[in-house]
Image: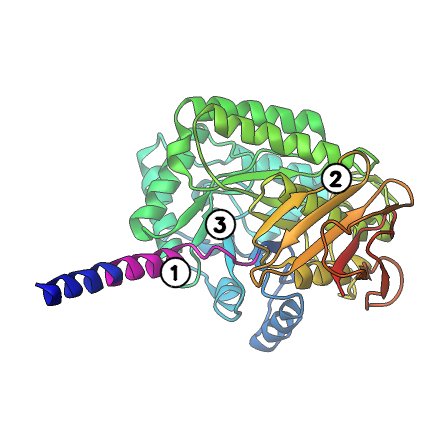
Amino acid sequence: MNVRISILVLLTVAVVLCAALAASAEEPRHEMRFGINGGIYPTGAVGPDAFRAIHRRLDELGMVWLRHPGRGSSWAEVEPEKGKWDWSRLDGALLENRHPWLFEVWGQVGTAYPFKGDFSRRHLAGLARDGGRKAVMDYIKAHQVDLSDAAQRADAEHYVKTFVRRYRDRVRYWEIGNEGISSPDRFEIVKCTYQWVKEVHPEARVVVTAPAGDDDTTYRKGLHTFDRLMARGMGRYFDIGNVHYYGRAGDDLDARLEKRYDEYKAILDRHAAAKPIWVTETSTSSDPRSLLSGVSSEQTQARHVVQRAVVLFGRGAEKVFWHDYRATYADNKFYQCNLVDPKTGKPKPACYTFKLLVSKLGSFRSVRRITAGTSRVYRFVNPDGSCVFVAWGRAATTIDLRGHVATPKVMLTHIVEDGGSLPERETADAGRIPISPSPLFVEER
């Protein structure tokens, strides 16, 4: 009897352990928290050597998530003629590096139907030459796929399933488009894409398209649309929520980030949709007269690399992606949001600061804000149990962390925001740590 009981106990323990290991493999609790988005690979032909050189530069940032490699990923580019596929750029981007990917099923420019319009680069370049980027976007919107048309619906299903099937061994997280899906029925696009992805890749996690705003009015309109779609039951057709919020630089940016995030989460809560939230786009331009960010600088951008991520993580975001890596251009509102110079490829201070941020908090386990008021101090706990504090304030002051650290002295690491590529470090008394508008990392010494 004792032997039988022992065997039963061992079998029970084995089952529990196997289930725990399977759950761990299914959903790693402490994986990379940061990502970069857009312009990862330059326009034009990129051969194997060029791809490898880009991958090496990406590796230097740490194993961050990648999202949207650049041109070559929209339906019209992947399937330029019905039944004829071009995987050359995507294979080079997706299959030849080690980074985790969040990939947009439709590409970044909506759900255009490629077989009733001319989406060749030559035609789109002509539209841009005559009417600017707006003319290109208007053309794309005018040719959105209509899922009420049986032929278009069949083509769309074949495209999505072919796309996901090709990369399912490399990509697990799929995003339904980018931002405003402006097809005749946005709900139907989300529903069908989710179902098609899951049919081919049941283990996939699907990220819903994001309400977006470079200003609060546009963002609130997106939230209103999202709320109406959730009321129709859209929550059944995605696994992860998605926010894009930029906002202009200013003293109240931290509070606005919190408010916009909370507004999105309130919609999920109102519709009983317990979903993790990823912020797959946020950033500040370094352009002194940015249309997106207002008055800014490389120094401001470097500070916001830390502040945006830390504030959003503090509200509960699971991952935060910086937009973008390289490909911004002068007639675009996102000009100079990139981490590296779009012409020379030289890293900006924001790039070195992003690398520092990833090295300190890349796979953190938990975060909590431990101050109120205008000074912000956040306590991050990493998987190994170590703590890293991130602190800044609107003005120069001091903070006391003696109740939070075990050593009388602490190590301070400053971000890179001016010249150079390496952060400066110094020690300070735990009871009198100087902070300023420039974020600071604080660790036990």
Separation of marks 1 and 3 at Cα, in angstroms: 35 Å
Q: Using the image, determine if residue 181 lies above or below residue 351.
A: above
**Residue at x 80%, y 60% (from the top left corner):** 408
The percent position of residue 33, horizontal first and vertical second, equals 58, 54
Q: Using the image, determine if residue 163 lies above or below residue 376.
A: below
Instruction: Name the residue that disc number 1 marks.
Output: 25
Q: Secondary structure at mark 1?
A: helix
The percent position of residue 79, horizontal first and vertical second, equals 44, 54
Q: As shown in the figure, which amino acid type bears the numbered disc 3?
A: Ala
Q: As shown in the figure, which amino acid type bears the numbered disc 1?
A: Ala
Residue 438 appears anywhere in the view: yes
Front in this rendered view, residue 219 or 46: 219
Instruction: Name the residue that disc number 3 marks.
Output: 76
Q: As shown in the figure, which amino acid type bears the numbered disc 2?
A: Thr
The percent position of residue 216, horizontal first and vertical second, equals 70, 28
Front in this rendered view, residue 53 or 48: 53
Q: Secondary structure at mark 2?
A: loop
Instruction: Name the residue that disc number 2 marks.
Output: 371
| Screen quadrant of the C terminus | bottom right
Q: Main secondary structure of the magenta part?
A: helix
Q: Nearer the viewer, mark 2 or mark 1?
A: 2
Q: Nearer the viewer, mark 1 or mark 3?
A: 1
